[in-house]
Image (cartoon, rainbow, N blue to C red):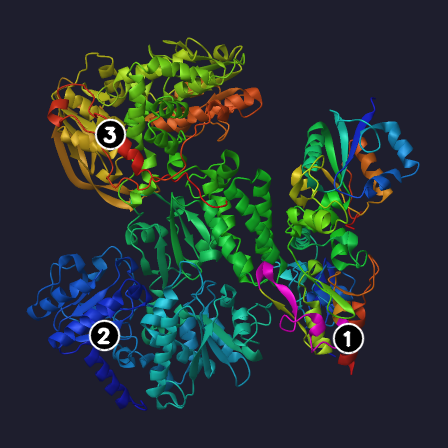
Amino acid sequence: MMIQDIAAFSAVREAGLAKLLPSRPRIAVGMGTCGSGNGAEGVYNAFSSEIDARGLAVELVPVGCFGFCAEEPLVNVWVPGHPLLMLHRVQPNHVDDILNGLGHGHLPPAEIVLCKIEEWDHLTGHVKYGSGYADVPNWNEIPFFNGQVKIVLRNCGLINPDDIEEYIAIGGYQALYKVLIDQDPAGVIEQIKAAKLRGRGGAGYLTGNKWEFLQKAAGPDKYLVCNADEGDPGAYMNRNEIESDPHALLEGMMIAGFVTGANKGIVYVRAEYPLAVLRLERAIEQARAYGVLGDNVLGRGFDFDIETVEGAGAFVCGEETALIASLEGQSGRPRSRPPFPAQKGLYGKPTNINNVETWYNVAPIVSKGPAWFTETGSAKSAGTKVFSLVGKVHSTGLVEMPLGTPLAKFIYDIGEGGTNGRDIKAVQTGGPSGGCIPVEMFDTPVDYETLAQLGSIMGSGGMVVMDEDNCMVDVARYFIEFTHSESCGKCVPCRAGLDQALRILNGFTLGTATLEDLEALDELCRMVRDTSLCGLGQSAPNPVLTSLRHFRHEFEDHILAKRCRAGVCEDLALSPCENSCPLHMNIPRFLQLYKEGRSEEAFLSVILDNPLPASTGRVCQHPCDNRCRRAALDEPVNTRDVHRLIADEVLLSDKFEAMVSRVLERRLDPTGREVAIVGAGPTGLTCAYYLALLGHSVTVYDSRPAAGGMLRYALPEYRLPKVVLDREIELIERLGVKFQFNVNVGEALTLNDVGHQRDAVFLAIGTWKEAWVYLPGTELTGVIPALTFLEAVSRDEQVPVGKNVVVIGGGNAAIDSARTARRLGAEVTIVYRRERRDMPAIPEEIEAAEHEGAKLVYLAAPHRIVGDKNGQVRAIEAVKTKLGEFDTSGRRRPVLTDEVIRIECDSVILAVGEKVDPDFCKASGLKVKEAGTLEVDRYSLETSRERFYAGGDLITGASNVSNAMGIGKKAARNIDKRLMGQERFPSLIPDFEYRMEPPEPPSEHGRHVPGEMPAAQRVQSYAEVSLGLTAVAALDETYRCLRCDIRSGER
Amino acid sequence: MDKRKIGTCWLDGCSGCHMSLLDMDEGIVALLEKADIVFGPLVDAQEWPEGVDVAVIEGAVSSQDDLKLAQTARARSHVVVALGDCAVTGNVPSMRNGIPSRKLLERIYVEGATERPGVPTDGVPALLKRVEPLQAAIKVDVHVPGCPPKPNSILFVLSELLEGREPDLGSKLRFG
Amino acid sequence: MTEKVKVRIDGEVIAATPGQTILEVARANNKYIPALCYMEGLSAVGACRLCMVEVSGVARLLPACTTPVQEGLAVVTSSPQLQSHRKIALELLFAERNHVCAVCVSSGHCELQALAQDHGVTHVRYPYNYPRLTVDTTHPRYVLDHNRCVLCSRCVRTCAEIEGAHVWDIAGRGIHSRLVSELQRPWGEATTCTSCGKCVQACPTGAMAEKGWGVEEMTKQPAVLSRLTSMREGQ
């Protein structure tokens, strides 16, 4: 039906409305490429055959995508008079239930109901679906949609993209009609300029200005081009826009055609987007058939036609001059500007090129005016931008947000944070031309200028979230590899410069790079950026340059420590577990040795990697669990409990003596070098152990009467029986380490005394100062710091706690204090200001505390401790908090509310964190950092004073046992290297021969968890709670390991 | 003042750079007043001595022996000069880099042999996978390109180095 | 006579004709700006990026060969940053292919070699690529050695714009770009080649040469080609 007048236009509109809001139920299946990829075709077919079979009066249509990719397939169900119901993760087996409910007003199963839409503003028109379904949240109450402003995506996922009548029904082509009637091209350009619409392809040039250039360019032949050559990895908004709403693109181009005097439009679209091409071509055919496109558009005497050209997939063809060359049939290489396309473009004629998304903004601006448009967005960047939020984020999909929205809003509110509790560390914006923005800068507003200041770009709107599993060096390498292979080769810097940059980056991931390479890379990337011919080369170094700026330490790790913390660069790690272990234990090796029944060698493997394997086997935070690949199948391998068993079997048995001599055999010849260590905690003990093994003479000083530090004086007996620790320390002593107890270095003995006639000194005192919160009432009797409390209990001293104890804090010390207080017979309440999942304590420990009867109160910030007239604690008052904005740790900041709770109690244990004794640091004369910790070289651990090294909590602040030991091990390695002038550390480990084959088949059993004493029984005593794995369970656990350390093929 | 020590050696090259070194006429007399040549094809020392002031290395790094000698020279010398295009760029020796060394040896010693075909293994150093310029193997302080570099350029570089100055080559030298 | 515009090159005020590029104005006034892909008489493509200059008021560096002059334009042709960038570009070219100067017919008459010398390139700081490249000797009179090609496309433009035969083009992309005659046909079998040899004369390095010359023996006359164009334009 040709539309040549208003009456015909209205008739089509009515017909379309009758389809959109029919008199019978309508089911719309989201069938973009994303939906189809998730099985939407099957769902559609199931609906179709079931509707036919039942003879139901139900409309079934395909629509595009509403943007929530993580929840595909999406299906809309509308029953006249009711809201539009949006269903998610719909499978063909849901079809029956959905159809059954239709006639009876029943909702589909709750697990597939996502949200409802009562009315929708298409901007060019308004649709009222109906109200009801009180229990179903509105669409914008869903976190993923909350805050989204749908201008570009106004029609996506709601109308049938293959039906022009539906587009006209929601006000489509009205803006075009208005422009053709008004006959005021200059006025329209003024509107676009006033709206401050900027190119959405990335460069952000003002669209109105570009149109004006074209309008003013001479000549009858002018071209409009839509750049739909979307090629950024991780960006797919243009595809979805075309697939879901092709007519809005055509309308935008036609309006521009009329006002600039162009009569020909070309959509240059990737051939890799077959569905987009198909729907676009159908839309063009329909528009021609309805008289909306072609000669005499809408009967208004304006001729304009549009054709599609499929691009062959070269990334560089997104650059406008290369795109023009490609359209002309030449190879896609850019050329220098000037002349600009508006002067000399396609076939030498004036040409204007805009990105897909830019065109989608045109009709709403014409309909609603520039003032409406500038209400959204920031001062310089008006309107919205569609972003593809992908990567390591919980909710992925297409997100349309006002420009200027802070990054944190995208990541934590819309995306709901990281996946599987992982910490997010950066977002890559703008694809291969963009850069990485670190988590510390997530308050950055996303607009053109701010991103550019950070060395990134908006680009087409890709937003790839990276977490701790992403190696930023590898990310930079990946993007350079991409631009390197997409470089056209015309100009030298891009062609040969990126090639060299890639070589240098490969060196980092292989561990062969040097610090000079870091400088060379920086210089080379700046040269490529400054001198390349087109945007591809000019922006290709951005991922490297921003990573060098924000993540330089990761590059340095790859060079100086030959470590890839994320475990991505496989040449730098044995296996993910080894890489994540602070002690870098060869976990697959001891598992395999144990599996082969060689338990003594397994012990040797364990003890040579970790001098406190039985203690850490009980209390380690087990970072290896988070990296274990077995977790992808069921649960991670319980390596911690296996090495506990291996160690217990020796340490607590008559095999001990024999194994001591096996370890002594590994000791290198005496070197005659003397090393002093201050602090006999885990860090100092580990360092002493290895230095003794390396043949040095070692003396350890400690202010307390026995060795072990926190392990002895802060960890309760029920978690770590001291008999185990004693055995481990005995082994260290047998290696020749001398201990000087009850010596307070810094007071009785100066550092100079310690360093006198010593070849090296290692400082490893712990964090024995309780960080004190200054609450009103902390001076009251009955308020005790957690460490004081735990130490007193461990020394069997009389502890003044009453019957009702409140513990403040959420770390391990808080949980240990609570569980210990329970054993002293007290009723215990733990008060924590954030949510449970934010607690730094080991989750199993929190659970155990609960089982033992401790009460937990979350989201409560203590604000005063109430005392009686005798100065004795009577109660604590806390303000309830709610979760506010995300802070830089990726956790929501607790915000105070008006609600105050009061808990009656007679004791308060403060476990709000520990810190280094600042007096010691100050008195040491060594350089101190702002945080109060000692300044050391990150890699050598040397302090500002030569021969003096520091480690453990002194440099990191409060940490955990394994991290502390890891630093002690690293210190020993570095001190030895410095003393002996060569790397001798690896020679401590004998050649263990063991099978390099994965288990065939691996055990199908789930993770073996040690048995525990019943909770009721354990609060009666300090006996160890965990009973450890049985030998059988441990053996089966070794069969669960998939042996990631085995490599096959040539590397 | 004690005389300075110069060591020279010749890796994978044609000896042309050493010819050029000898070709500096009376310049060499002045040079030898300031320094002794303590190692190299021109003298009969068997091992690169410790404490050399200037190491002058001709040729690309092509075999295990080349690599070892270059590393020894580097470890025992204060300044290392890469002399000539082979040492600086790889030059002609590097033209074999497109061909696997096994194929290369077979082509020459088997296919190309008129008598006793067979790849020699005894008493000859193993070829490296790729010929590299000197700087790919060790740190080089001064590069003197040229095939060969002109005698005067060599004299200038050595004189400056012996005076403890960094020679400013500017645009005095070119490849080839 | 068109109106002249005043530009400033390295501080000196120069009168230029609108439409001229910075490089043209500089060369006409004995101001040195290095370039490799630029050749008088051919269209400018801005591929080698050696002629990048600083223009006051413009944050980015601009290629002198394709940037037209405007009234008041002030250009700096040399600065530590520009020299550093140019030096890197030259080193990248040497590392990219196998330019073994010692055995090249053009040694001593090579523009790449001369530029390296001008910029004090005594060695290449990047690892050499050592690609395996062919030498096309199929043409009876000329030879094409890909090892020495810098992809400046002067031959391509000479053949297309002066000779009008368009035998040459560049195929592939990125680091794998190669000069090709016709559609990958060996040069000797190219039916459109007139064997005029203009491409050889335009080539700045030893990539294209006449057969029969030894090391350092081949000299070229690109100026003759430039004159051809200016004489045609004068007609």
Cβ atoms under marks 3 and 1 closer than 8 Å: no
* CA neighbours of label 1 inside 10 A, class few (<14), some (14 to 19), many (20+): few
Q: Read off the chain for label 2.
A: A
Q: Mark 1 points at which residue?
A: C196
Distance from the alpha carbon under mark 2 to that under mark 3: 59 Å
Closest to the observer: C78 or A395?
A: A395
Q: Which chain carries label 3?
A: A
Q: Name the residue under label 2.
A: A61
Is A51 on the left-hand or right-hand side of A427? left
Where residue A118 appears, as percent x and y from the top left, is 17, 67
List x then y, in percent, for residue A877: 16, 31
Relative image position of residue C52 (x, y in whole percent)? 66, 59
Residue stretch rendered in magenta on the structure? C173-198
Q: Which type of secondary structure does the marked residue at label 1 adopt? A: loop
Q: Nearer the viewer, residue A993 or A756?
A: A993
* 1 and 2 marks on the same chain: no
